[in-house]
């Protein structure tokens, strides 16, 4: 009886140690869906500044929840460009650096941004994950149109059809000049903007990082 108890205890200890030594590999191509914890903008932020985002979907492999929702991605703004006065749009490149689990474990991650939702006018510009903001073309057209309309009305009051034409040209030019002296709209990512990073290198998580979040018994 005593020998049996000792044997069972030994097996339990061996299995426990084996479990603690187990590792899980999150393969390249895995998606990390998260939401920004702060607002980022080409008007307010600078290249090199840090950002944080919270994972909203767990990463599950072989029925094990390897990375739980609520984990935090920390990263950097590796490049940033404000929109120009005459041409160009705001751009920002966000790169993840580390992943922190709720239990305090931290892992280095490497990934690229390939989707963003909730940022007005923003889109992914290239395979590097550069975010590009809205351009000022529609704003310029609208303001030139308003200038032409206003100038035509004033010109027609004082000079009939000819005056309306001249006034429209002058008003349109004034609207264009006023529009060009200002920068285009900045790229802004509000709090809660959904970002999807795709891992481009495998991520190895040891068992102690997932022991509290195991789903294999479902």
Image (cartoon, rainbow, N blue to C red):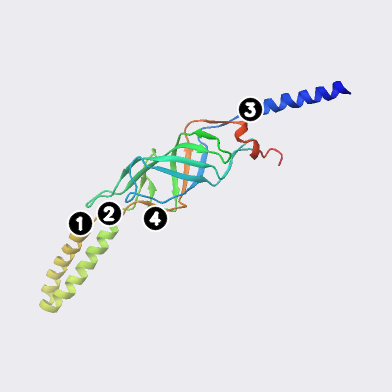
Name the foreground residue: 83 vs 163: 83
Furthest residue in direction front, as rendered: 2
**Badge 1, how many Cα within 10 Å: few under 14, some, many 20+?**
few
Instruction: Point out the tag, 1 or 4, that comes first from the N-terminus.
Output: 4
In this rendering, which labeled residue sits more in front, label 1 or label 3? Answer: 3
The one of 101 and 114 positioned closer to us in this rendering: 101
Q: Residues within 10 Å of mark 2 (few under 14, many from 20)?
A: many
Residue 120 placed where, x, y %?
A: 39, 55
The quarter of the picture where the C terminus appears is top right
Of the numbered discs in the image, which one, if any, rests on residue 181?
1
Disc 4 secondary structure class: loop
Disc 1 versus disc 4: distance between alpha carbons? 23 Å
- Local secondary structure at mark 2: loop
User: Does residue 11 sit above or below 194 in this rendering?
Assistant: above
Residue 167 visible in the snapshot: yes
> Tag 3: Cα neighbours inside 10 Å, few (<14), some, or many (≥20)?
few
Q: How far is the residue under mark 2 from the one under mark 4?
A: 14 Å
49 sits left or right of 139 in the view = right
Q: Tell me, yes or no, whether the two marked residues, 2 and 3, touch with CB atoms within 8 Å.
A: no
Q: Nearer the viewer, mark 3 or mark 4?
A: 3
Q: CA distance from mark 1 to mark 2?
A: 9 Å
Residue matched to label 2: 184
Is there a contact, CB below 8 Å, between mark 1 and mark 3?
A: no
Taking the image as drawn, is residue 63 in sight?
Answer: no
How many numbered discs sit on the rendered protein? 4
Q: Secondary structure at mark 1?
A: loop
Judging by the rendered image, the residue that carries numbered circle 3 is 22
């Amino acid at each position: 009886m005593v020998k049996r108890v000792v044997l069972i205890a030994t097996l339990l200890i061996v299995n426990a140690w084996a479990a603690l030594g187990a590792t899980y590999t999150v393969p390249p191509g895995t998606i990390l869906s998260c939401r920004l914890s702060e607002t980022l903008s080409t008007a307010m932020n600078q290249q090199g500044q840090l950002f944080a985002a919270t994972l909203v979907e767990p990463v599950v492999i072989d029925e094990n929840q390897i990375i739980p929702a609520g984990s935090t991605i920390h990263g950097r703004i590796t490049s940033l460009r404000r929109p120009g006065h005459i041409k160009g749009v705001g751009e920002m490149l966000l790169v993840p650096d580390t992943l922190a689990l709720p239990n305090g474990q931290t892992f280095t991650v490497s990934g690229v941004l390939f989707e963003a939702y909730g940022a007005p006018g923003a889109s992914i510009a290239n395979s590097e994950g550069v975010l590009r903001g809205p351009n000022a073309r529609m704003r310029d057209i609208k303001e030139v149109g308003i200038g032409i309309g206003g100038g035509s009305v004033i010109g027609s009051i004082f000079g009939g059809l000819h005056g309306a034409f001249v006034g429209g040209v002058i008003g349109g030019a004034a609207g264009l000049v006023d529009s060009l002296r200002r920068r285009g709209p900045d790229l802004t990512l509000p709090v809660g903007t959904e970002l999807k990073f795709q891992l481009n290198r495998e991520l190895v998580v040891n068992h102690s990082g997932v022991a509290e979040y195991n789903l294999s018994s479902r």
